[in-house]
Image (cartoon, rainbow, N blue to C red):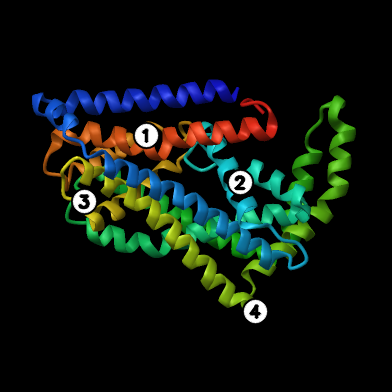
């Protein structure tokens, strides 16, 4: 199944890039391909790989705060981060891979509840970062964005983030609601072959939710306000490293790196690519980038080359490295 999703994601991505090439490619594009400064492409790839290290650091720091009796080394944290790459490239939207991280953290002794709290906590920190940075990005790009559909997608993403934060905060204080909801859902499953298994799961719900609640409270409690600040700082560094990659690609193509505009555009693209339509957000990312960067990159003939270079570093590289790592751990790309 995942192999099929991977193929679908690659086809959609290649097709989207081909469309951009068809709309923007001209004779001068061929000359510009030969003039690419490869050192900037390599530097962009280096920043992307460095972001995996920072992600691993965030996992290590969060593990320390969620359970002081257990720990994950930086090397192990990086491994857990890399294990996420392949699955996130083949699941709908650009985020994914959470089940793999939960599984690997559980094997480190954190249990499913605390592991889930940690992984969900990571996404909450991401959401906080984007909620704080989104107004700035919109302000910067306000003079560039003319597409009403783009503005609608941006609004929907903003509402989704804010709604998720509010819901998480509420459920954090009301764990009984989680227990009742999950139990009610499971008991509605009336398939004879798995009814007994479902009942065993119901019996474990209380322990799971309590463990999740305790772990989440450990991360987001006021006594850990300094830890929250540290994790938010690490989260910001992670995303800024990712957002600087397109500027490196532009520099390699002899263009102005437009760092401020590019970072702002990347914030919007991440929100857009979370929409669970295509594997790894493929198609959405390429199309969105073509529209956004066309507003502030004067030379439209390099857009196709730029998007291909950007996805080569941030998507195709993830598939290769994440796939090899998953095969090493699980012995199959389809698990």
From the viewer's side, name the closer residue of 136 and 89: 89
Label disc, if present, on residue 264 of the rendered structure: none
Sooner in the amino-acid sequence: mark 4 or mark 1: 4
Who's the residue at 68% across and 57% down the image? 72
Label disc, if present, on residue 223 of the rendered structure: 4
Do the numbered discs 3 and 4 sit on residues whose CB atoms are within 8 Å? Answer: no
Rendering coords of residue 147 (x, y %): 22, 43
Sooner in the amino-acid sequence: mark 3 or mark 2: 2
User: What's the CA distance linking mark 4 and mark 2?
Assistant: 29 Å
Quadrant including the C terminus: top right
Which element carries disc 2, helix, strand or loop? Answer: helix
Reading the image, the residue beneath label 3 is: 257
Label disc, if present, on residue 79 of the rendered structure: 2
User: Within the image, what quadrant is residue 290 found in?
Assistant: top left
Graded by Cα atoms within 10 Å as few (under 14), some (14 to 19) or many (20 or more), the crowding at tag 2 reads: many
Which element carries disc 1, helix, strand or loop? Answer: helix
Reading the image, the residue beneath label 1 is: 312
From the viewer's side, name the closer residue of 46 and 305: 46
User: Within the image, what quadrant is residue 241 found in?
Assistant: bottom left
Sooner in the amino-acid sequence: mark 3 or mark 4: 4
Using residue 3 as the reference point, say whether residue 161 is left or right of it: left
């Amino acid at each position: 199944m995942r192999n099929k999703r991977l193929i679908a994601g690659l086809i959609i991505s290649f097709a989207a890039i081909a469309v951009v090439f068809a709309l923007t490619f001209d004779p001068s594009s061929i000359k510009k391909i030969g003039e690419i400064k490869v050192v900037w492409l390599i530097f962009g790839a280096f920043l992307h790989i460095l972001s995996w290290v920072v992600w691993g650091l965030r996992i290590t720091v969060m593990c320390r705060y969620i359970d002081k009796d257990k720990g994950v080394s930086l090397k192990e944290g990086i491994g857990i981060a890399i294990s996420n790459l392949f699955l996130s490239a083949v699941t709908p939207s650009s985020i994914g891979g959470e089940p793999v991280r939960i599984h690997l953290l559980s094997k480190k002794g954190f249990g499913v509840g605390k592991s889930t709290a940690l992984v969900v906590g990571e996404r909450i920190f991401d959401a906080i970062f984007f909620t704080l940075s989104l107004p700035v990005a919109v302000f910067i790009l306000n003079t560039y964005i003319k597409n009403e559909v783009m503005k609608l997608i941006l609004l929907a993403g903003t509402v989704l983030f804010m709604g998720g934060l509010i819901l998480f905060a509420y459920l954090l204080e009301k764990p009984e609601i989680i227990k009742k909801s999950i139990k009610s859902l499971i008991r509605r499953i009336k398939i004879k072959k798995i009814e007994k298994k479902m009942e065993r799961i119901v019996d474990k719900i209380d322990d799971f939710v309590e463990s999740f609640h305790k772990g989440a409270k450990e991360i987001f409690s006021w006594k850990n306000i300094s830890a929250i600040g540290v994790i938010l700082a690490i989260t910001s560094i992670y995303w800024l490293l990712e957002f600087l990659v397109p500027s490196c690609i532009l520099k390699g193509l002899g263009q102005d790196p437009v760092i401020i505009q590019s970072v702002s555009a990347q914030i919007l693209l991440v929100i857009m690519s979370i929409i669970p339509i295509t594997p790894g957000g493929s198609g959405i990312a390429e199309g969105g980038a073509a529209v956004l960067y066309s507003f502030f990159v004067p030379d439209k003939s390099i857009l196709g080359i730029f998007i291909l270079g950007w996805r080569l570093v941030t998507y195709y590289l993830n598939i290769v490295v994440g796939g090899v790592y998953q095969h090493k751990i699980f012995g199959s790309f389809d698990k």
